[in-house]
Amino acid sequence: MTTGAAIEARKLARILPGLIPVTLVDGIDFMAKPGELVAITGASGSGKSSLLYLLGLLDEPTSGSVIIDGIDSASLTDAQRTHLRLERLGFVFQFHFLLPEFSVLDNVCMPMKKLNALPEQAQAERGRMLLKDLGLEGSEKKLPEQLSGGERQRVAVARALANAPSILLADEPTGNLDSKNSHAVFDIFRRLTRQDGKTIIAVTHDQELASACDRQVHLADGQVV
Amino acid sequence: MKLLLHIALGHLLARKRQTLVSMMGVAMGVGFTIAMSSLMEGSQRDFISRIVDNMPHVTLKDEFRANPAQPVDLVYPKGAVALKGVKPKDEIRGIKAPWNKIAALETMPGVRVAPSLHAQIFLSFSGKDVAVNLLGIDIERERRASRIEEDISTAGGLTALESAANGIIIGKGLASKLGVQMNDTLTAASASGVVMKMKVVGLFHTGIISTDNGQAFALIKKAQILADRPNVINQMRIKLTDPMQAIEIAAKLEQRWGYRSESWQESNEGLLGAFVIRNTVMYITVSAILIVASFGIFNVVSTVVFEKTRDIAILRSMGFEPADIRGIFLLEGFLVGLLGALLGWALGFGLSQILGMVRFNIKMMTEVQGFILHSTWIHYTMSGGVAALSATLAAWLPANKASRLKPVEIIRGAA
Ligand SMILES: Nc1ncnc2c1ncn2[C@@H]1O[C@H](COP(=O)(O)OP(=O)(O)OP(=O)(O)O)[C@@H](O)[C@H]1O
Ligand SMILES: [Mg+2]
């Protein structure tokens, strides 16, 4: 059906209904291949986040479709879409969204516990491994509030990777980080695409980080330019 | 489920004070329910056991529930004839062929019967007259079927009645009303005009004021003479080995002989009915406490939902379903309810112990010098169950609201 795209958007549009309808995304065609690191850039309000929510099946398009690993999401039920998110998609946001009551390891293991594909022991094992990969060894038992901003964001990345998703969607993951930490996060992205063949789509305002990606998609007024 | 529990516990443990306060609300509700209901149950059981112990289980009287049919009605049962001003033939009151009936009753297993003649008499002593209900009794049978002898403090018990020509045993209250003492002789007069000198050969104290102040016992023969009703027996008080069979046996006897036979339940209908009302009032009060406790839970779960919107959004984006989110918050309500109920059990148990130790000194009231408590596992399971259920219901609204949150809207707002 598709030419080996990990994720694809066809004529994707999202209009917020209301007295004055707001067009968030205006007929976007987009695709990303396995192992590709794509940067989405554009001015504030150009629809980058909106596009990412649609690609991540968090929001439903007004028209057009999102195809993930050859599956047209429009043909799925809510529950199936939720399950697809659990298995194949990972999210990282500008804000880390870690659960404050739970330890770093608990946070990372949360999606694994929900999916419950691995035995408990293996889940914790994998959680530790992910944290180690992201340079967070020794922080497993800490609470999120005991970490620095950059560390928290890396925990969020570890959590997004918990169920080994094929696609990672990141919305300004370095928006709250300094340049050193930002580069660290993008280095991790780089490695994940090269070594593990994951597809990563990252929204960023940072031109330097964007140009280090495989490809840039620039948005303006909800359209690709 | 384990995961949801893990998250729910995490939320509650992070808000220990708030959680504890709403748990205490539930605990108070449950604790007071248990204490109150065991108090109620205790006094009710005590009361019923007093009735069952002290009163006849079935009373057969020389009365009929319906007036006897008159000859004209018997001849023309459906006739359009009405006779007014009929003067029925005077019948000699009393149970017919009483000794045959007593013999028949005594062949029934688990049945003891005390025949008696009840007569209204006046006792006078040194110018004071008191109306008294005199029971003419048969000592042997009275012993077997009633407990009056236990309440006679004077020597010889009922047997003392045989020690004098006209012996009478009266209540202590009556004695002090009349100002008589043991071995005093007083004057008894009946409605039929017979007057008799009677000697006080015994005193009793049952603790039931109306009995202590208004009842007297004599041998049946003497009572029959005093009332001028030779050989008449007008009541049979029946004790059963199993008091719960009273209704059934009373119905059977009434059907067989036609005489009004009252079970103890029927005789105390008013009181037993009052218990129903009292219990209803109690349950309403207790539900009010639990409703208040539910508001506490509603409040804590709503607050958590409000504070946790971001977490809900991230869980949803991660792949948690709406049902999972609802489950988390319902569990939180349930946990608060459950732990509150457990705490309430301890509180209820403690309160019951304390109430059980309270002693008062009210002379006039009863023999009881403290609360009588009786709690059953039903009180515990019911109050605990209702608490856990209402806690879960209270959490339903906020939990449902949480499950319907749209993750995009929250993330958009938070980003
Ligand atoms: N709930 C909403 N109601 C009305 N307009 C909205 C709503 N959400 C977003 N918008 C508008 O939709 C447009 C696209 O928003 P979006 O968040 O996708 O932009 P963005 O490119 O991610 O911007 P930023 O770089 O600031 O994050 C913006 O103009 C925004 O104001
Ligand atoms: Mg944005």
Image (cartoon, rainbow, N blue to C red):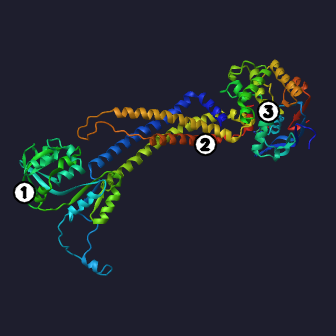
Q: Residues within 10 Å of mark 2 (few under 14, many from 20)?
A: some
Is A203 or B229 nearer to us in this picture? B229
Q: Residue furthest right?
A: A3
Disc 2 target residue = B397
Cα distance between the residues tagged 3 and 1: 108 Å
In this rendering, the answer to whether B409 lies above or below B259 is: above
User: Nearer the observer, disc 2 or disc 1?
Assistant: 1
Disc 3 target residue = A90
Tell me the element at label 1.
strand
Is B111 or B206 nearer to us in this picture? B111
Query: Image point 21% across, 51% down: which residue?
Result: B142
Query: Image point 6% across, 49% down: which residue?
Result: B127
| Marks 3 & 2, CB-CB < 8 Å contact | no
Cα distance between the residues tagged 2 and 1: 80 Å
Query: Image point 35% across, 58% down: which residue?
Result: B248
Q: Return the disc, 2 or 1, that comes first in the chain's sequence.
A: 1
Is residue B252 shown to the viewer in this render? yes
Q: Chain of mark 1?
A: B
Is B402 or B149 nearer to us in this picture? B149
Locate residue B89: give its quadrant. bottom left
Q: Chain of mark 2?
A: B
